[in-house]
Amino acid sequence: MPDKPLLDQLIDSLRCLPGVGAKTAQRMALHLLQRDRAGGARLAAILAEAMHSIGHCRSCRTLTEDEECRLCLNPERDDSQLCVVENPADVLALEQVTTYRGRYFVLGGRLSPLDGIGPTELGMADLRRRIETLRPRELILAMTTTVEGEATAHYVAEMAVDCGVSVSRIAHGVPLGGELEYVDGGTLAHAFAGRRQVNAD
Amino acid sequence: MPDKPLLDQLIDSLRCLPGVGAKTAQRMALHLLQRDRAGGARLAAILAEAMHSIGHCRSCRTLTEDEECRLCLNPERDDSQLCVVENPADVLALEQVTTYRGRYFVLGGRLSPLDGIGPTELGMADLRRRIETLRPRELILAMTTTVEGEATAHYVAEMAVDCGVSVSRIAHGVPLGGELEYVDGGTLAHAFAGRRQVNAD
């Protein structure tokens, strides 16, 4: 309704943000109007530009406003490793906490035939092309351990083997500092079955 | 830094929202980019317009994009009652839950000499003009019960009496459904001291 007061329209439109309900949206709108108009104006400008110009990197399919993202353009990254993740958020998480210096490929989801998400939707052809161009020595799988994640990992692993690339997968197990009694059963069973020999020096 | 990727700029600028830290900002940015571009674009447009054109109503000083807000322009509101509140949020709260049909005046804060907020900053001259124009029968004080709120209420009450208007104040006491043992001491003492006679019919 364009006839609503602008303040009400602002409160309504803030609710498109995840986790923001009516009360929080009202608090945000009043905060910006009363205390941080400059921040609000900057947010509006960047948001408009981002919604309009951010697309997918043509090499790794992560989110970027350029044709190719900075990670793909960076000549110092190691071409011999390629990490396959489900979402752009996974790239950000890995970049923030690991020392990984290789390349990425973002599927944008996981195989889920019931939702109409098959190999085409996930850009498996792009991934194969990426593998053939990059010729990495190691392909690292970093999918979740849900049923769909496992199926996706299996599919990607087969493709990599087909291309003659060795495949590894990030470790799943008990989180650091996690008390065994509070870890969920599936994780604990997985960690136990996947135990490794300790070599005392 | 204009050299940062646009996604990072978006995440940074979302942090101007109250209660939004680095993780939440990232989740919001990715949600908008991956699932709700239309909502994000609409938010950007309305936010830009709101930051630019929302000002204060010349009659009641609440937030509005017009010269006078809809509550002040509404001829069906009752001119005989004037409710004085601290913030625009208070107007929204009262409108949502009460059947009050009178007028409002928004101070935009409370008297706080240490922070440099005196009668001039709160537009007390505007309030006096509003009282003289409107000639209400009753002025309703709806400030908080902090020290500054009490001082502000006292100041406004004196002005109203000076203008020959009768003054009331919203009730402070135990919240509905509140268990006495969990109510804070100040509120309970206030509620006890402010007890009212019950007239059995």
Image (cartoon, coloured by chain):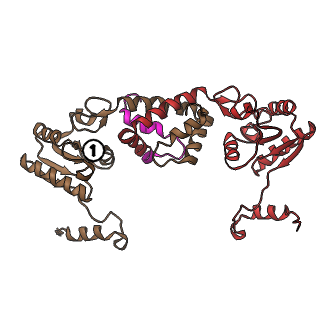
Chain colours: A brown, B red
- Give left or right: position of B11 versus B89: left
Residue nearest the observer in this picture, A198 or B151: B151
Residue A86 visible somewhere in the drawing: yes
Tell me where residue A61 appears, x and y as whole percent: 25, 38
Which quadrant of the figure has residue A54?
A: top left
Tell me where residue B45 appears, x and y as whole percent: 49, 29
- Residue displayed at 68% across by 39% down: B88
Residue nearest the observer in this picture, B103 or B120: B103
Eyeballing the image, is A13 above or below A141? above
Residue nearest the observer in this picture, A45 or A148: A148
Residue nearest the observer in this picture, A186 or A92: A186
- Residue displayed at 80% across by 35% down: B119
Q: Where does label 1 land, which residue?
A: A108
Q: How many other residues sit within 10 Å of disc 1, few (<14), some (14-19) or many (≥20)?
A: some
Q: Secondary structure at mark 1?
A: loop
What residue range appears in magenta?
Answer: B1-24
- Give left or right: position of B66 versus B43: right
In the rendered image, residue B6 lying in the magenta stretch gets the answer yes
- Residue displayed at 17% across by 41% down: A127
Tell me where residue A128 appears, x and y as whole percent: 13, 41
